[in-house]
Amino acid sequence: MFCSKCGTQNLSSSFCTNCGSQLQAVQPPLGTPTLQPMPSSVTQSNTLSVLAIIFGSISFLLFPMLFGSVGLVLAIVAKNKNETKANTAILVSSLGLGLGLIFGAIVGTLAF
Ligand SMILES: [Zn+2]
C-alpha cells in the first residue's frame, strides 16, 4: 500500500507511517501504471519486419529478384506474426521488388 499523499510504502497500517494520512490509494503515486509498456508490446518483436525492410531497401539497388523476394517472404511471415511494422515491410519489399525489376529492366535495356 502506497500513501497517496507522500508516496511512502506502508506494509500493514491503514494510516501512513510517514505523514499520517489515511491510506486508500492502491496505486503508487508516481504514475507507474501509465509508464509501463503495454504487455503486448513487451513481447512484440519487429525483427522480421526490420529485416524485410532492409532486404526491400537493398532490392532497390541490387538483385531485386533475390532481395525483394526474400524481403517479401519475411514481411509476410512478419505479418502472420502480427508484427506492427509488417505492413511497412510488405510495402517496402513489394516496392523494392517491383521498382527494382523495372529499374533493372531499364538499365538492362540501356546497357544492351
Ligand atoms: Zn504519507
Image (spheres, rainbow, N blue to C red):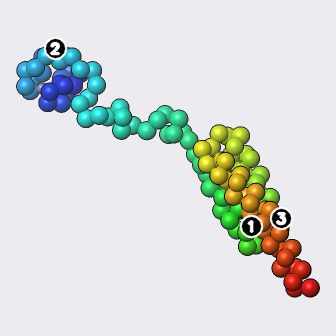
Q: Taking the image as drawn, is residue 63 in sight?
A: no
Mark 1 belongs to which amino acid? Ser
Q: Quadrant of ligand 1?
A: top left
Say which residue label 1 marks. Answer: 59
- Res 51 → quadrant: bottom right
Residues at discs 3 and 2 in contact (Cβ within 8 Å): no
Label 3 or label 2, whichever comes before in sequence order: 2
Residues at discs 2 and 1 in contact (Cβ within 8 Å): no
Q: State how far apart marks 3 and 2 are (Cα).
A: 69 Å
> Camera-side residue: 30 or 94?
94
Say which residue label 3 marks. Answer: 65
Mark 2 belongs to which amino acid? Ser
Residue 49 coordinates in the image, percent (x, y):
65, 52
Say which residue label 2 marks. Answer: 14
Left or right, 24 with reference to 60: left
Mark 3 belongs to which amino acid? Met
Q: Residue at x 76, y 57 (%)?
A: 94
**Residue sitting at the far right:** 112
Mark 1 secondary-structure assignment? helix
**Residue sitting at the far top:** 14
Q: Residue at x 16, y 14 (%)?
A: 14
Classify the position of the N terminus by image quarter. Answer: top left
Label 3 or label 1, whichever comes before in sequence order: 1
Q: Residue at x 49, y 34 (%)?
A: 39
**Residue sitting at the far bottom:** 111
Q: Residue at x 83, y 74 (%)?
A: 104
